[in-house]
Image: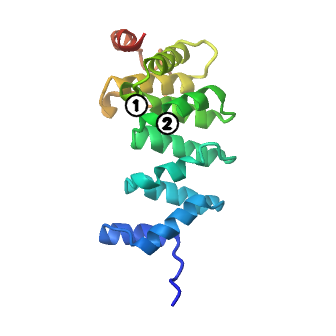
Amino acid sequence: MAQKWKSVKQIRDEYFDTGTISPISMAQLREYLKGDNEDELSRAIDLVTDASLMNLVPLMAQHLDHEDWYIRELLIGNLLGILCLPEYAEKGLDMIEHDEDPGVRDLALSNIGAVINKIEDKELKKKIAQKLIDVLYSETEDHLTRSASYVSILKDLEVPAIKRPDIDLIIGKDYPIDEEKIEEFKKRYL
């Protein structure tokens, strides 16, 4: 007898109700991660992240260049900011520098600080740190982008979230830059 095909929501419910995902549901989740239904793909990405299904991370990471900005934004935020996986830092830097969507760039920027100290490549650490400093003090970047950079620096310095500024505050006006923290960050990497 053929198994009933489940939606990602049903697989998610199975996980939260039982604490596990059956082999059949896991196989179906893999298919969602390979598929092109963007709604189910985004739900599958969230489930993999929430359940820390690390064996599925490479499969979901294949969508980092997805045509839909929302999928790229969701992925880089989850990979860097939630799962804190330094192996995606180089891709995060590439997205900061080259993605056409400002939301994707800002989300990569605000989360890359969660992994800098875990990166083994010293040159990559330095490039990321310099990019964060350059963006923070840029006169051409908007305040959201500059704030994203500042938040990322504070994440690296392990400043608790409650003590970090809201990303929509204007850095330097609504929220002052803590120059001592910036110097501490520079000494680590530059």
Quadrant of the rendering where the C terminus is positioned: top left
Q: Secondary structure at mark 2?
A: helix
Calculate the distance from the C-alpha at mark 2 to the C-alpha at mark 1: 9 Å
Q: Is residue 170 above or below residue 64?
A: above
Q: In x, y percent, where is residue 130?
A: 50, 14
**Residue in the picture at 46% in, 33% down:** 111
- Please state the total of marks drawn on the protein image: 2
**Residue in the picture at 33% in, 68% down:** 20
Q: What amino acid does circle 1 point to?
A: Val
Q: Secondary structure at mark 1?
A: loop
Disc 1 marks which residue?
Answer: 115
Q: Is residue 158 above or below residue 13?
A: above
Q: What amino acid does circle 2 point to?
A: Tyr
Which numbered disc covers residue 35? none
State whether residue 167 appears in this view: no
Q: In x, y percent, where is residue 117?
A: 36, 25
Viewer-side label of 2, 1: 2
> Which residue ends up furthest to the bottom in the rendered image?
1
State whether residue 61 appears in this view: yes
Q: In x, y percent, where is residue 54?
A: 40, 51
Q: Nearer the viewer, residue 171 or 79?
A: 79
**Residue in the picture at 34% in, 67% down:** 16
Q: In x, y percent, where is residue 156?
A: 36, 25
Q: Residues within 10 Å of mark 2 (few under 14, many from 20)?
A: some
Which numbered disc covers residue 88? 2
Q: Earlier in the sequence, mark 2 or mark 1?
A: 2
Are the residues tagged 2 and 1 within 8 Å (C-beta)? yes
**Residue in the picture at 53% in, 86% down:** 2
Q: Is residue 82 above or below residue 22?
A: above
In the drawing, does residue 60 fall left or right of residue 82? Answer: right
